[in-house]
Amino acid sequence: MKLKLNDTVQVVAGKDRSKKGKIIKIDRKKNRVVVEKTNMRTKHVKKTNEKAGSKITYEASMDASNVMIVCQHCNKRVRIAYKKLKNGKKERICRKCKETLDKEVKGKN
């Protein structure tokens, strides 16, 4: 999976199509991501002797193929390419504007 936590992504399929948000959770085994304020679900909590009943809204996970990363430089949704660095590491780059998508790598260069 080419996505990382705190990446800004845009939903490209489903009921929340064209919404933007940050990734707040990733499940790499199931290939699913949770994006803030998208795919909202409601859970009804039954009342108990100590607490009253309530409704809880939360972000449900979605398949990673339903989101695309948004480049900070060209502000468009893009696919990801990789570029090898001299120290042997890889960095993610935008296929449209060829700028880096990894914020921490850009600060070190």
Image (cartoon, grey):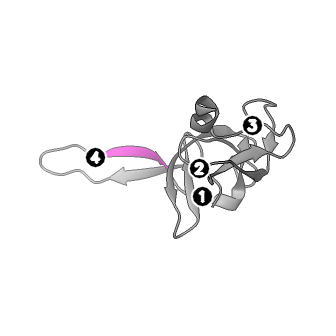
Density class for disc 2 (Cα within 10 Å; few <14, some 14-19, many ≥20) is: some
What is the three-letter code of the residue carrying label 3? Answer: Cys
Residue 6 position within the rendered picture, expressed as x and y whole percent measured from the top left: 55, 40
Q: Secondary structure at mark 2?
A: loop
Contact between marks 1 and 4 (CB within 8 A): the answer is no
Q: Earlier in the sequence, mark 1 or mark 4?
A: 4
Residue 108 position within the rendered picture, expressed as x and y whole percent measured from the top left: 58, 32
What secondary structure is the stretch in magenta mostly built from? strand
Q: Earlier in the sequence, mark 4 or mark 2?
A: 2
Residue tagged by mark 3?
A: 71
Contact between marks 1 and 2 (CB within 8 A): the answer is yes
Q: Residue at x 38, y 45 (%)?
A: 55
How far, Cα to Cα, is label 4 from label 2?
A: 23 Å
Mark 1 vs mark 2: in front:
1
Contact between marks 4 and 3 (CB within 8 A): the answer is no
The magenta span reads: 54-59
Q: Is residue 51 magenta?
A: no
